[in-house]
């Protein structure tokens, strides 16, 4: 509906470039977020055009507003005029409006189609998918989709009310009845209305006019001897959309014409939050520079240019800008308080100015100096060494790539998608608990923790293979790679993966973009894309970052934590902080070289990630990768010297008075890292606790992201984790592991006759026990628990089952021969642990979504194998005898276990 468009005062245009009027309230309005450079957009736009034309041809009042993510106005106009339907577009001139719309409607990737109600809320979960399904469903599919959109957007109710002759009394009663249902949805008495009720009949709800309004608002007519209306729970969203239309119709009928003029706004009450500090002040200015100066003075922030301000009331996401401050006047006039969150430098001990470049052109100039310096330095200092050309070029390319994180427009693009206010509040809550212990300033560390969790859980997603662009099917098969198109090349895509849909046969392209801003739009990828995009996001928020490359094909980040005075390992795709030995100890990777690059340097940080650097085997791997270890070190030094020189030159141009202080800070930081890196001692000299030391499980766990098959191919599952099953987009992994001193005393398989949905483990230590569960909901009702008690001294030695798209069947067997099994008949057989493997299960990893998607077992060697073999022979003999005597198998196994323990204890 158009109410939101009117209130937002969006500049709409036609294909001819003329200013367009806002559609009326009887029109279904859709926002279409798209761009020509995006291949899925170019595939979906013709579908939307066909859908739009068909809807118009049957008299449906529908309007689409194109919101462009193109890189220039020329690209936007060409795309709009040549490929789109005859709908409207948001003028390209005001990019802040486009950004705000994307943030306001939670657009996490394009193409995206949002169907609006009057209040400016998205009323359809996935407009793009519904359009594709409607087209596939033929005429009936179109009709069902359009009727649903009319209902959920409130257009059905608005259209009926606009021409209705129902009395004001009737409309008010209709609203009251509707509110009864929405206010108490579980009470069935409000869902049925009888027309014999005097109040109902007198209000005219039984008349044709009343019936038209009631059915347009979501009620269903009941005919027969006791006529009336009823509304099923499935129509509640329709009721909610209709409530606004009723309220507006009633208000319009009651309204009296008044005129009002807004007087000058007074002071605005504002709550300014900076780290864990907050101040209540009154703002009498709407000038951004003055406000920034006021905030700097209020919190004694020395570098005024480092101040970044965010406010959900002034701008949904992104930094507060001069235009956004118009909202202050509106807040003042309405008597509302505004909350502003302030971020400053998160490296306060670094004297370097926060703003080394004031524009993109200055940043590009800095990058050109770096490029020229790299060419000269690497050639003169390391040109003749025996390092492989491909390795040398990779180091140089990465030194150039990190310059992208310093470009102001790139940082602005990143900040426009980060929910800074939300993350700030969570960080403050987290760090206050820590600060109570010793008063240390933990804010930056807690903000980093929240940023990593948000990036992993809400923003970026892992991509094994893309869904089909045509039908949305997840079953696509790789067809190899191809070269990028010119549009894909603009996003720095060096290659494009090609997939064919196994259902409809369509081809889907998946460009491997390398430009971090392009990744802000696609929000998907593998470890390279994750680290690349996260580096830009963290740098934009105010952290100093390093882009870290592991020669064995992994990429992550390091972030400078000022309180601890050290670089901290951050793996965004695993959501792990400060677990540098995870790759060697947990994933069992055979590392060779790890180097980290930032705006001011490049260095070999391999010692941080291994404890085997000095071994002959490790050194041979370094030699094999580089071709020349000493030469590799010289290349890294040459690149570091270039980055450092260009960095200091930039500082000198911006603030010559602090150059020596910056130089000393960098020298001391580098020297301290050189002396502590790779030590078993904590590198931090800071007092207080380390908030990141909660990721110890990462040191013993294999990799979590990516399909099991892909991780297995890369050798990153970890020696002690054996796993089977697919990874889907909604898969959540949970480790069911013992705490110190605990033993597994019971395991339950949660399943029905169709599939397995989870596991529940009872862990006991002495008299204390706890339950740990990982379970998805079953579409067939509550699953049944199949329990197996694990006696002391007994171990799980077999985990087998059947699996397809999820785990269909699971069987768990102990060293004594007792077992449980549950599930359905589908899937192919698999085994994780077999009884003759010589392994025992010490914990489980469950991947689940709508079902149990995968099952993993953490294993250890069986202790005292000879004694175990002897016990097995005794148990087998006893078990056979007891079964022959008429016992059921479980009872026989239990008795055999007890008798075996007794005999072994007595030495028999």
Image (tube, grey):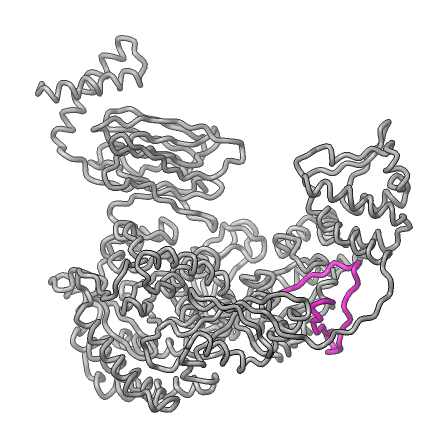
Instruction: Report if residue 24 lies within the magenta region.
Output: yes
Residue 603 picture quarter:
bottom left
Say left or right for 723 vs 321: left
Q: What's the residue at 38%, 33% (across, down)?
A: 810
Residue 790 percent across, percent down from the top left? 28, 28
Residue 864 percent across, percent down from the top left? 13, 33
Instruction: Report if residue 192 lies within the magenta region.
Output: no
Q: What's the residue at 56%, 53% (across, down)?
A: 472
Q: What's the residue at 35%, 85% (across, down)?
A: 371
- For the record, the magenta segment spans 6-35
Say left or right for 547 vs 330: left
Q: Is residue 463 above or below residue 263?
A: above
Outermost residue to the left = 907
Q: Is residue 737 above or below residue 602?
A: above
Say left or right for 529 vs 779: left
Q: Nearest the camera: 382 or 312?
A: 312
Q: What's the residue at 46%, 39% (across, down)?
A: 776
Q: Is residue 47 above or below residue 169?
A: below
Q: Nearest the camera: 317 or 554?
A: 317
Residue 232 picture quarter:
top right
């Amino acid at each position: 509906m158009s109410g939101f468009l009117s209130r937002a005062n969006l500049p709409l245009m036609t294909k001819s470039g003329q200013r367009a009027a806002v559609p009326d309230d009887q029109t279904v309005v859709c926002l279409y977020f798209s761009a020509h450079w995006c291949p899925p957009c170019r595939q979906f736009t013709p579908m939307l055009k066909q859908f739009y034309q068909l809807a118009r041809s049957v008299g449906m009042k529908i309007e689409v507003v194109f919101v462009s993510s193109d890189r220039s106005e020329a690209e936007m106009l060409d795309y709009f005029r040549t490929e789109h339907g005859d709908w409207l577009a948001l003028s390209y001139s005001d990019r802040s409006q486009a950004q705000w719309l994307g943030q306001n409607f939670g657009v996490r990737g394009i193409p995206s189609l949002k169907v609006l109600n009057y209040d400016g809320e998205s009323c359809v979960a996935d407009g793009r998918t519904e359009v594709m399904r409607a087209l596939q469903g033929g005429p009936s599919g179109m009709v069902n989709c359009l009727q649903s959109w009319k209902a959920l957007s409130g257009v059905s109710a608005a259209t009926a009310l606009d021409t209705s002759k129902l009395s004001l009394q009737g409309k008010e009663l209709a609203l009251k009845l509707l509110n009864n249902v929405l206010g108490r949805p579980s009470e069935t008495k409000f869902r049925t209305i009888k027309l014999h009720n005097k109040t109902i009949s007198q209000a005219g709800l039984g008349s044709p006019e009343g019936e038209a309004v009631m059915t347009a608002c979501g009620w269903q007519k009941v005919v027969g001897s006791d006529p009336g209306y009823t509304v099923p729970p499935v129509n509640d969203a329709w009721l909610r959309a209709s409530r606004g239309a009723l309220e507006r119709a009633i208000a319009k009928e009651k309204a009296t014409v008044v005129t009002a003029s807004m007087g000058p706004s007074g002071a605005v009450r504002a709550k300014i939050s900076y780290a864990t500090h907050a101040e209540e002040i009154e703002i009498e200015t709407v000038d951004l520079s003055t406000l920034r100066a006021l905030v700097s003075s209020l919190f004694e922030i020395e570098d005024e240019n480092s101040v970044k301000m965010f406010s959900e009331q002034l701008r949904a996401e992104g930094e507060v800008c001069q235009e956004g401050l118009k909202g202050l006047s509106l807040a003042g006039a309405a008597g509302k308080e505004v909350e502003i969150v302030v971020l400053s430098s998160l490296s306060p001990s670094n004297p370097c100015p926060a703003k080394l470049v004031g524009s993109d052109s200055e940043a590009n100039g800095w990058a050109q100096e770096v490029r020229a310096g790299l060419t000269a330095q690497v050639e003169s200092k390391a040109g003749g060494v025996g390092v492989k050309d491909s390795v040398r070029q990779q180091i140089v390319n990465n030194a150039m790539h990190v310059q992208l994180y310093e470009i102001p427009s790139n940082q602005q693009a990143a900040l426009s998608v980060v929910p800074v206010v939300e993350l700030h509040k969570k960080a403050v809550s987290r760090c206050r608990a820590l600060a109570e212990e010793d008063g240390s300033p933990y804010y930056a560390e807690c903000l980093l923790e929240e940023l990593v969790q948000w990036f992993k859980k809400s923003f970026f997603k892992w991509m094994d293979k893309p869904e089909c662009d045509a039908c949305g099917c997840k079953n696509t098969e790789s067809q190899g790679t191809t070269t990028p198109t010119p549009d894909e090349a603009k996003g720095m895509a060096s290659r494009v993966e090609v997939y064919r849909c196994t259902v409809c046969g369509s081809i889907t392209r998946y460009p491997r973009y390398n430009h971090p801003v392009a990744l802000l739009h696609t929000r998907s990828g593998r470890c390279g894309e994750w680290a690349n995009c996260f580096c830009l996001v963290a740098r934009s928020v105010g952290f100093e970052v390093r882009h870290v490359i592991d020669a064995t094909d992994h990429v992550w980040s390091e972030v400078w934590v000022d309180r601890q005075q050290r670089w901290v390992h951050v793996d965004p795709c695993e959501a792990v902080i400060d677990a540098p030995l995870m790759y060697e100890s947990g994933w069992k990777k055979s590392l060779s070289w790890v180097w980290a690059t930032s705006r001011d340097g490049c260095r070999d940080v391999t010692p941080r990630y291994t404890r085997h650097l000095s071994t002959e085997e490790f050194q041979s791997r370094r030699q094999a990768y580089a071709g020349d270890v000493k030469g590799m070190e010289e290349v890294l030094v040459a690149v570091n010297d270039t980055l450092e020189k260009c960095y200091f030159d930039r500082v000198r141009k911006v603030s010559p008075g602090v150059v020596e202080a910056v130089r000393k800070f960098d020298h001391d930081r580098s020297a301290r890292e050189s002396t502590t890196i790779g030590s078993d001692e904590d590198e931090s000299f800071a007092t207080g606790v380390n908030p990141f030391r909660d990721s110890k499980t990462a040191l013993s766990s294999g990799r979590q992201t990516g399909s099991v098959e892909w991780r297995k191919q890369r050798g990153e599952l970890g020696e002690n984790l054996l796993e089977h099953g697919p990874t889907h987009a909604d898969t959540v992994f949970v480790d069911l592991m013992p705490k110190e001193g605990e033993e597994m005393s019971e395991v339950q398989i949660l399943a029905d006759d169709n599939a397995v949905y989870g596991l529940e483990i009872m862990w006991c230590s002495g008299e204390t026990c706890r339950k740990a569960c990982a379970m998805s909901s079953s579409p067939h009702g509550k699953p049944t628990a199949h329990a197996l008690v694990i006696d002391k001294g007994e171990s799980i030695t077999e985990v087998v089952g059947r699996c397809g798209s999820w785990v269909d069947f699971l069987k768990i067997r102990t060293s004594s021969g007792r077992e449980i099994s549950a599930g359905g008949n589908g899937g192919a057989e698999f085994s994780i642990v077999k009884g003759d493997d010589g392994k025992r299960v010490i914990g489980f990893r469950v991947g689940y979504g709508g079902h149990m998607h995968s099952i993993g077992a953490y294993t250890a060697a069986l202790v005292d194998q000879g004694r175990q073999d002897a016990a097995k022979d005794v148990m087998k003999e006893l078990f056979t005898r007891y079964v022959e005597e008429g016992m059921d198998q479980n009872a026989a196994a239990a008795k055999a276990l007890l008798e075996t323990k007794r005999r072994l204890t007595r030495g028999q």
